[in-house]
Amino acid sequence: MLQVENLSKSFKNFNLDNVSFHLEPGYIMGFIGPNGAGKTTTIKLIMNLLKKDEGKIKIFGKDNVQQEKEIKDRIGFVYDSSYFYEDLSIKQMKDIISPFYSHWVEDTFQKYLKRFDLDPKQKIKKLSKGMKMKFSLSLALSHQAELIIMDEPTSGLDPVFRREILDILYDIIQDENKSIFFSTHITTDLEKIADYITFINKGRIIFSKSKDEILESFKIVKGAPHLLDASIRKNFISLRETKVGFEGLTESPRIIQNTLKDKVIIEKPSLEDIMVYMVRGE
Ligand SMILES: Nc1ncnc2c1ncn2[C@@H]1O[C@H](COP(=O)(O)OP(=O)(O)OP(=O)(O)O)[C@@H](O)[C@H]1O
C-alpha cells in the first residue's frame, strides 16, 4: 500500500533523516512523535506536496511523483489545516472537488453530510474547526479510496465525535484491501484501533512495529531509589527519579526482574508512557 524508503529532506533547522517504513493492505498505522518531529513533513512528501532530497516513496507499488495523478485518485487525504475556499458553501466546494475523482459516489457523500449533521448550504467560513474536519472527512471517504492518509484528523474534536471517526475508520478497514495511515497526538485513539505504530523523533524513525509487539516489549518498572545501581540503570531507556522512588521504561524487564525479584513492580506501559520516556531518553 505504502512504502517509504530512505526518505530524506533538509530544511535550514531540521533534517528528515533516512525515514523508512511500510504499510500492508488491511491495516491501520498510527504515526506518532512529539511536536516538530517531522510527521507533517513526511506526510507532505508522501503526498508530493514537498520535494524530497533523497529516497523512494511507492504507493500501490507506483512512484508517488511519476504516477501522482493516478495514485491520488485512489487516496483519501485529510490535511490538518483547511485548504478550502472560505466564501463557498459546502455544496459549491464539493462540486469543485468531486469531478477530480473518477470514482466519486454522491450517495456516500450525502450519507456522511447527514451523519455529521452538515448543511450543504452552509458557507465554509462559518464552519467550526470540528465541522471543517467533518467536511474534509466526508470528501476523503466518498471516492472509494483504497488508502486514507490523514494529518491529525482527530485534533480539536470532541470525544464523542472522535469515537465516531474511529468507528468509521475501523469499518473501512474491514475491507481487507484498504489501509489507513494517520498522524496523531492522541495515543489513546491508537490504543483503540491501530495495528501498527510508527514513531518518529527529531526526523528519525525510532520504531515502526505492530502495536501488540510494542506493548509487549516495553515495560514500566517501579522501585525504591536505593535499588538503582549502575548495572541496573543501564537497562533503562530513561528514568524518572524522586526521593521516594524511581519509575523507568525498559526493553529488558527480565534482566531487571531476575536481579531485583519482587523488590520492583513491573507494569504494562501505555503508548503515551513509551513516547514520553523514549523522547526523554534521547
Ligand atoms: N517549509 C519549511 N521550511 C523550513 N522548515 C520547515 C518547513 N516545514 C517544516 N519545517 C520544520 O521541520 C520541522 C518538522 O516539522 P513538522 O511540521 O513536520 O513536524 P510535526 O511532527 O508534524 O509537528 P507537530 O506535531 O507540531 O505538527 C520543524 O522544526 C519545522 O519548523
Image: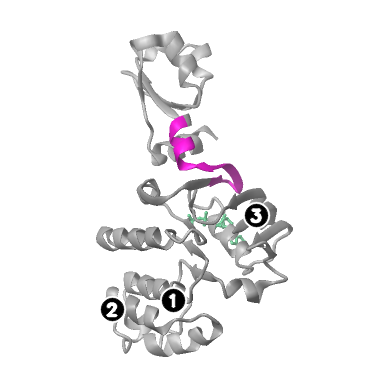
Residue shown at 50% from the left, 26% from the top: 251
Residue 173 position by quadrant: bottom left
Element under label 1? Answer: loop
Asked if the residue at label 3 sits under 8 Å from ligand 1, the reply is no
Residue labelled with disc 3: 4
Return the x and y of residue 125 as percentages of the image width and height.
36, 82
Quadrant where the image shows the N terminus: bottom right
Q: Cα distance, mark 1 to mark 2?
A: 13 Å
Q: Nearer the viewer, mark 1 or mark 3?
A: 1
Q: Amino acid at mark 1?
A: Ser
Residue labelled with disc 1: 142
Q: Which residues are magenta?
A: 199-216
Residue shown at 46% from the left, 21% from the top: 253
45 above or below 257?
Answer: below
Precedes in sequence: disc 3 or disc 2:
3
Q: Of residues 90 and 146, which is closer to you in this image?
A: 146
* 4 left or right of 163 in image: right
| Residue 168 visible, this angle | yes
Asked if the residue at label 2 sits under 8 Å from ligand 1, the reply is no
Q: Nearer the viewer, mark 3 or mark 2?
A: 2
How many residues crowd mark 1 within 10 Å: few (<14), some (14–19), many (20+)?
many
Precedes in sequence: disc 1 or disc 3:
3
* 17 left or right of 195 in image: right
Precedes in sequence: disc 1 or disc 2:
2
Element under label 2? Answer: helix
Q: Cα distance, mark 3 to mark 2?
A: 37 Å
